[in-house]
Amino acid sequence: MNEESRRRQLREDGRRPLAVNLAEGLALSEFLSTFTGSAREDLEALEAAQEDA
């Protein structure tokens, strides 16, 4: 994303209601925590399989 489009997006986000930005931030946070949790579980399973081999 270039600098101009980043600025434009920040201005658009700034015009939205706080509740909308907060809801999107919380949804993203939940997604990322689920994603990292899944990745951690996959890594632990892979490490366990390597130890058994």
Image: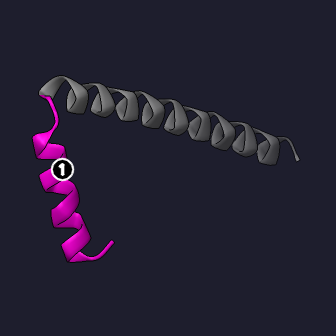
Q: Position of residue 34 (x, y in %)?
A: 51, 30
Residue 23 versus residue 45 in the image, above or below: above
Which residue in the protein does label 1 denote? 12
| Residue at image coords 38%, 35% | 28
Residue 16 colored magenta? Answer: yes
Residue 51 versus residue 1 in the image, above or below: above
Q: Main secondary structure of the magenta part?
A: helix
Residue 4 versus residue 47 in the image, above or below: below
| Residue at image coords 70%, 44% | 47
Local crowd size for mark 1, using a 10 Å CA cut-off: few (<14), some (14–19), many (≥20): few
Between 4 and 40, the residue placed more toward the observer is: 4
Direction from residue 29 to residue 34 in the image, left or right: right
Q: Position of residue 50 (x, y in %)?
A: 79, 48
| Residue at image coords 63%, 33% | 41
Residue 9 versus residue 4 in the image, above or below: above
In this rendering, the count of numbered labels is 1
Q: Position of residue 36 (x, y in %)?
A: 50, 39
Direction from residue 53 to residue 44 in the image, left or right: left
Q: Name the residue type under label 1.
A: Glu
| Residue range highlighted in magenta | 1-17
Residue 32, by quadrant, is top left
